[in-house]
Image (spheres, helix red, strand yellow):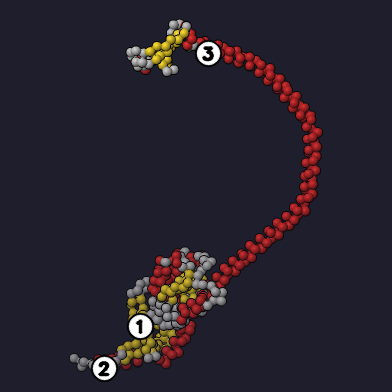
Amino acid sequence: MNRALSLFELNSLVREAIEEYVTDEYWVEAELASAHESGGHCYMELIQKEDGSNTPIARASARCWRSTWALLKPHFERETGQTLRGGLKVLLQVYPQFHENFGFSWIVTDIDPTYTLGDMARRRQEIIRRLKEEGVFDLNKELELPLFAQRIAVISSDSAAGYGDFCKQLSENKQGFKFAVELFSAVMQGEQVEQTVIAALNEINERREDFDCVVIIRGGGSTSDLSGFDTLALAENVANFPLPVITGIGHDRDESVLDMVSHTRVKTPTAAAAFLIEHLQDVYSLIVEAEDDVIRCVTDRLQKERLRIDRLIELLPKQLAAFLTAQHARLGRLVELLPRQTAACLTSQRGNLDLLAATMRGVLERRMLQENHRMELLEHRVDAVNPEKLLQRGYSITRSNGRVVRSPEQLKAGDEIETTMEKGTIKSVVTKS
């Protein structure tokens, strides 16, 4: 049996084998699982996933020493606009290194930023394609910014200098416009951008009646770490948001997906404030122009009416004279016609009166006969009930105190009664009732 090797001896054999047989440098495509700096060095975890899934099929550690990293880092960030972070696809030039104590690692000697740019561009294009297929890419742009956009919901870091600059610019505008600003805090750099900005948008959406627009601003941080604004979920939220969204995230080099789907994109927080002030100034100018137009229209109308009245005043004597002349002529014609028309009218009325007289005579004669007959009937009726006629027939009338006695109950012993008959009247005293 061979002698057992110590771990150091075994690791030394591995190191010697690698140094002897793997001597070249290689370009390798990989995804960064993580990347961080320590002591000026950059430590990376590389990963390769199975196509179409997130299942890792290879892992390795990589290091970039301080002397090399000091050159590669600014070049990479300048070209890509990104810091080296987890999730990026990279193309690294590496050589192998094995240390008895620290194990195996790939040592990075170069990074090709164009590869990362290409991958980032592909991912951005995929997001843009998805948004356009969903029909939401231009939805927020189609919203109309209210004329008086003064109630502003701001999404930013509460400690960001850009938020302070934004508020200062709004409050100190020369026109004296008043704005009401409310901050909804979010992380504006790193991996939490998407989650916290979406949470802020959801909070604003619950109170959307309180605001005219949303402003997403970022200031005071690294201008290279803007990857959080190039995500599908955040872009969908902004594209579908019911209020106009204005972005000012300080991204001068390239337009982020968030910028593309927002209502208006400006470069900086102060530019966002200037945009809102200018919008309100444009509205104010429209109001002033409308006021001038109203004054001009009223002035023109008054001038036209004055001219019309002046013309009427000039024409009035002539028209009045013409009217009076016409009326005099009409009166003259009426005076000429009046005797003839009066004579004709009188002749006509005389004929009517003659006709009525002839008609009335016959009517009156018939009416007189009818009334005479009626009177005769009434006379017969009156004669039939004449008390004198009744007395002649043997009837009498008894009175007491001038009243006709109709019943013995009306009298009592000692009452004096008067009885009227055809030939005279007798008086009696009641002895018994």
Closer to the camera in the image, 259 or 50: 259
Farthest left residue?
Answer: 1
Number of the front mark, 2 or 1: 1
Q: Evaluate whether residue 128 shows in this view.
A: no
Res 375 → quadrant: top right
Q: Residues within 10 Å of mark 3 (few under 14, many from 20)?
A: few
Per the image, label 1 sits on a secondary structure element best described as strand
Amino acid residing under circle 3: Leu
| Residue wearing tag 3 | 378
| Residue wearing tag 2 | 9
Q: Is residue 283 above or below residue 417?
A: below
Task: Tell me, yes or no, whether the two marked residues, 3 and 2, touch with CB atoms within 8 Å.
Answer: no
Amino acid residing under circle 2: Glu
Closer to the camera in the image, 113 or 354: 354
Q: Which mark is residue 45?
A: 1
Q: Quadrant of the C terminus?
A: top left
Residue 283 % position (x, y): 57, 68
What's the CA distance linking mark 1 and mark 3?
Answer: 143 Å
Amino acid residing under circle 1: Glu
Residue 414 % position (x, y): 36, 15
Number of the front mark, 1 or 3: 3
